[in-house]
Image (cartoon, rainbow, N blue to C red):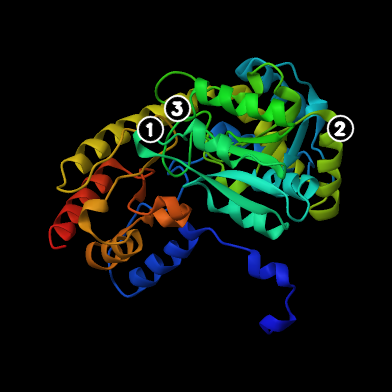
Amino acid sequence: MSDEKLASRMARLGSETAFDMLVKARTLEKQGQDIIHLELGEPDFNTPTTIVDAGKVALSDGNTHYCPPAGIEELREVIASHITQSRGVEVNADWIVITPGAKPIMFFLMLALIEKGDEVIYPDPGFPIYESMIRFVGGIPVPIPLLEDLQFSFSQKMLLSKISSRTKLIIINSPQNPTGGIVGEKDLMVVADIAIQNDIMVLSDEIYSNVIYEGKHDSIASIKGMLDRTVILDGFSKAYSMTGWRLGFGVMRPDLQVQISKLVTNSVSCTPPFIQKAGVKALKNGASSIIKMVGEFRDRRDFLVKELNQIPRISCLNPHGAFYVFPNVKAFGKSSDEIEDYLLKEAGVALLSGTSFGKFGEGYLRISYANSIENLTEACRRIRKALNNL
């Protein structure tokens, strides 16, 4: 189909550059080059056996038919209990919508809330699908810079300056992709005050809430007055190494849950019930696998940050969550895109330019440490050698 026959909104749709980089890296591999993959944001662990077995049993038991669009009651109840305990808020199954992956919560919420010309504030550098979806539904993306000197949080003064009469939604992500930063309690309080005073909804992307190394996870939904105006986006991909299962959920007040469920009905009908049964097992019995995984990620983080900071002209903060580092490479005098391309071709290391996550990511790289210590060691050796020639 020629471009002129496509709906104009398709030109507003972005992409997720990690997958673009994967294609480039696979092409080089086919040509015989050895590539170390540090570009993808997915745990390199297998889904725990108990969860896989639960999915198999659910298939054998006939959980292969349609189910309610919002999800099976059992999983919604288990999620509600999990949210009540982990976030310190009181919700029940009527607050939960199950979706095939967590992205649909983001997309459906914007379809439900955003009119043409409405403004949406989102973090930059941040997950690229935020801006893509805002533009696609006709909204106006308003980036709020995440600053290295604030541990990749935002300036409270700058956030206030971004608020207008057209602001309809604020997106926050903690722990963050791509920086690994945390939005602290004081900053969450500022967002809450702004949201309450200006009647603004908040989408709180908490997909990495289980991958946190110091302290505890704070959710803006826990702040007084925020539960009804917050939508929590979460899922099973990162915590339980279930990226390919496609199982996510949203937590929102019941009247909004009904509307989001309508969008589920009109798009995917429902999330496969046998996958939801595996999700029940994950939440009930998967805590030990999370502890083990986070412990391994912590070791890798500590190793990688130390190694990167020993490479001349690189500086790297110690991230408090997720499984990414976001090193500063401004001292090389090259764009992030140039360094990304150079390291792929000359060093055989696939990572991402900071600008893959927004214009304020210029001067940085995103490196996923969802890989073995052995491979991280070799990657650092290659990066050091290649950058010494720049």
Q: How many marks?
A: 3
Query: Percent position (x, y) of residue 34?
Result: 27, 64
Q: Is residue 7 above or below residue 144?
A: below
Q: Quadrant of the N terminus?
A: bottom right
Please name the residue shown 37% across and 27% down the image. Answer: 295
Query: Disc 3 on helix, strand or loop?
Result: loop
Q: Earlier in the sequence, mark 3 or mark 1?
A: 1
Element assignment for label 1: loop
Marks 3 and 1: which is nearer the front?
1
Q: Amino acid at mark 2?
A: Asp
In the rendered structure, the answer to whether residue 111 lies left or right of residue 377 reads right
Q: CA distance from mark 3 to mark 2?
A: 32 Å
Q: Position of residue 232 (x, y in %)?
A: 66, 32
Q: CA distance from mark 2 to mark 1?
A: 37 Å
Give the residue type that dot 3 points to. Ile
Left or right relative to 80: residue 188? left
**Circle 1 crowding by C-alpha within 10 Å: few under 14, some 14–19, many from 20:** some
Q: Residues within 10 Å of mark 3 (few under 14, many from 20)?
A: many
Quarter assignment of residue 302 = top left
Report helix, strand or loop for mark 2: helix
What percent of the width, then of the height, locates residue 42?
Answer: 47, 46
Q: Which amino acid, by three-letter code, is at mark 1?
A: Gln
Mark sitting on residue 212: 3
**Disc 2 marks which residue?**
255
Between circles 2 and 1, the one closer to the viewer is: 1
In terms of sequence position, does the residue under pointer 2 or pointer 1 come before the other?
1
Residue placed at 27% from the left, 48% from the top?
Answer: 375
Point out which mark residue 197 bears. none
